[in-house]
Amino acid sequence: MTSFTQDRPKLDTARGWRPEAEVDRRTGAVVWRLTHEPDRHCGSSYFYLHSFSADERFLLFARAEPRSNDNDEWDWRWCCVDLRLGEMCALDLSDGVDEQGRPAVRAGRWPQFHPNGREVAFLGNNRVLAMDPDTLARRTVCRGPEDGSAVLCDTPRFRPDDPRFVINCRNPHGEMSIAVARDDGAPVQDVFRWTNPDEIYCHLLAVPGVEDMCCTSAILPDFQNRFRESDGRRARCWWFNLTRFEARPFLVMPIGCRATHEHWVLTDEGPRLFYHRKRCATWTPNTIESVDVNGNDRRVHFHSDDRPLGHSCVSPDGRWLVTDVEDADGSELIRVDLETGASRVLCWPDASWRTNEFGHVHPSFTPSGRWVVYTSDRDGHAAAYAVPLHPERCETPPGQDGPDDA
């Protein structure tokens, strides 16, 4: 790759920017600040989406600017930073214009890197597009249903082991459905429709490592705290086999507990669904657990009696788990060895945990598994940071290992 194309809008505050080293005040670990916008919020993508290109040179992040005369409302814009060359650029993730010449369809809040590791995938005007952040070349990944019966309404959920993926649709009556698509530019196949417009799919996830096309999804509103409801109503998520047209409640907690922040991991033993199990009334004590594709073989990977565990992620090799803590008075990032159960604190992001996304840590691994990327607004405005999984091994920030080919 070469430098960003010249016709891309550069961010004035970020020209010549390089990752900045900081020493964590409690652990002594070197933490790298990856974005630099002192009067803006910047944050990496949601924890189960891919914020990094495969070579870890490009980081996709959200940048928020306060709307005029109202600092409580923010306009989002997606940007990309070339960590090797020290350039940040705004990405035009829109598709067409309206009568006033404004972008007709803004990308969803969570675009992501495509499984090919080179392109950014995002939702456009009833189609999923992929764009090379370096050349700006675009292509259509898939389109909405050919008969116009529904529109695509969420970020696609890819599988690392299959060209097929899943995405949510919504029809004019407000009913949502799960569609199956391929990366071939063709219309999606509208497979499973949820016929209650008052309930919606949320946290749609493709299941990796299975022959049939399967996914899980939460159904909102959430009834996990309503103990007299049926398992189907109390389930955190449902299992959908889109090949066999089957659906069933999947993740149901014991009375008094609830599950959150689930994500699938393809391990050496097959796919496992990791999730957080919390007490309904008090949150703590809480655990991070996983089950197999049948909802069995439950394993407890980490337990805390008093620290409210927020979001977690598993390393690409399946060996390590990292979780944040949701505590506005001080929040740590914890590494867990999934083989031995041993844990240690990597650093203290100390995020505010405000209601908007920029106050949440949302840790995720880089493709190599050497770094954990997270968001923190401890300085008043959020920024993306990276901490080494093994602080004693890494001395340079992500994206610095390849040759400087500017």
Image (tube, rainbow, N blue to C red):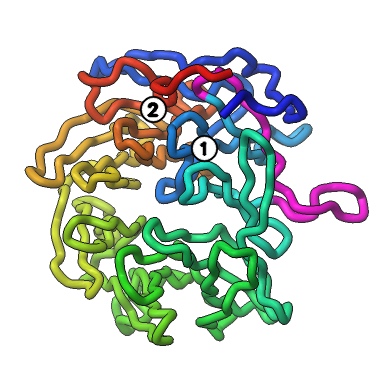
Residue found 87% across the figure and 55% down from its top:
98
On screen, residue 229 versus residue 405, left or right, reads left
Residue on which the image places disc 1: 358
Quadrant (top left, top right, bottom left, bottom right) of the C terminus: top right
Q: In the rendered view, would you say 209 is above or below 137?
A: below
Q: In this orientation, does residue 4 appear? A: yes
Q: Position of residue 52 (x, y in %)?
A: 46, 38
Q: CA distance from mark 2 to mark 1?
A: 16 Å
Q: Nearer the viewer, residue 41 or 133?
A: 133
Stretch in magenta? 83-106
Give the residue type that dot 1 points to: Phe
Q: Regarding mark 2 in the picture, which secondary structure is present there?
A: strand
Residue 399 appears in which quarter of the rendering? Answer: top left
Residue on which the image places disc 2: 386
On screen, residue 310 versus residue 3, left or right, reads left
Q: Regarding mark 1 in the picture, which secondary structure is present there?
A: helix
Residue found 30% across the figure and 75% down from its top:
250
Q: In this orientation, does residue 278 appear? A: no
Q: Residue furthest right?
A: 99
Q: In the rendered view, would you say 363 is above or below 39?
A: below
Residue found 74% across the figure and 25% down from its top:
6
Q: Is residue 342 magenta?
A: no
